[in-house]
Amino acid sequence: MTFRLKPLAAVFLLAIAAAQANAATVTLDGEHFTISYETEAQYLFGVPRLVDSTLVFGPSGSGFAAKSYGGNNVTNATFSFFITADPGYKVSSFNLYEGGDYMLIGDASVVSLGGELRVKPVGEAVMTAAIRPSLPLTTHTSFERFATTDWDTTASIRPTAKLTSAQVSIENMFYSFASSSQRGYAFIEMKNVELGFVLTPIPEPASYAMLLAGLGMMGFVARRRSQG
C-alpha cells in the first residue's frame, strides 16, 4: 500500500507546484499608487491596464455575457486586486463605470444586472456601492429588426478616513430569461469597465501646524477688531 501511495503523492505535489508556477502577481504602477492582482483573475474582463489614473478592462473573446434561447441563464464573477498609495498620498475616491448592450425578443424575455463595488481598507470596515443600470432594461426588439440597446451604470465610494491601502473587488451578475414557446431570445453583455482613482496628498504635521497657527492668527485679529 505504501508503495502505491508514494507515486500518487508525487503526482499530486507536482500538480500543486505546476499550479503555483503558473500563478503570478501582476503589478501596475500608477501616478501616486500601485495595483497588484493575480494573473488567474483576468478571465472576467480580459487583461486590465492603467490609463492615467483609471484601470481599464476590455473583455476578450466571448466577453462577459448571459443569453437565453429558452429558459434562463445566470453569469457571475468577481475581479479583485490590491491598491496601495505612495507615501504621502491617500485614495480619496473610487469611481466605477460599466457599459454594454442587451437584446430582448418576445414579450416574456427579460434581462437584469447587478453587483457591487467593494473596498476593504486594511484594518477598517468594508465600504460598498451597488452596481445597478442607470435605466430599466426593458426595450424590446424583433427578429426582423434584431438590434441591441446600450446600457451603462456607475458606482462610487469616497472614504471618509485616510485610506492608503485596500483590497478592491468588482462583482458582476447577469441574468437572462426567454420563453421557448414564444420564440424568445434574451441577451446581455459587458463591453467595457473603467475604475478611476483620485489620489490626494496627505498634509504633513508641519502643514497642520501652519494651518492651526494661521487660524489662530485670524481669530486674534478678529477679536482685536471687535474690541476696537
Image (cartoon, rainbow, N blue to C red):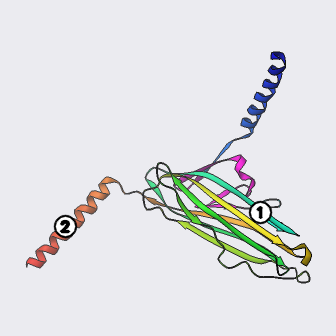
Give the magenta-colored segment's residue range.
29-58
Q: Element type at marker 2? A: helix
Mark 2 packing: few (<14 Cα in 10 Å), some, or many (20+)? few
**Left or right: 14, with 53 as reference point:** right
**Residue positioned most to the front:** 181
Q: Quadrant of the N terminus?
A: top right
Q: CA gap, disc 1 to disc 2?
A: 63 Å
Residue at image point 49% right, 64% down: 158
Residue at image point 81% right, 71% down: 177
Query: Residue 82: image x %, image y %?
Result: 58, 50
Q: Amino acid type of disc 1?
A: Val
- Judge by depth and name the residue closer to the eye, 191 or 110: 110
Is residue 52 covered in magenta? yes
Query: Residue 94: image x %, image y %?
Result: 55, 63
- Judge by depth and name the residue closer to the eye, 189 or 140: 140
Q: Element type at marker 1? A: strand
Mark 1 packing: few (<14 Cα in 10 Å), some, or many (20+)? some
Q: Amino acid type of disc 2?
A: Met
Quarter of the image where one finds residue 107: bottom right
- The correct choice, above or below, for 132 with respect to 3 in the image is below
**Left or right: 48, with 10 as reference point:** left
**Left or right: 77, with 70 as reference point:** left
Quarter of the image where one finds residue 219: bottom left
- Residue under pointer 2: 217
Which of the labelled discs sits on residue 74, or is there none? 1
Residue at image point 70% right, 47% down: 39
**Left or right: 89, with 139 as reference point:** left
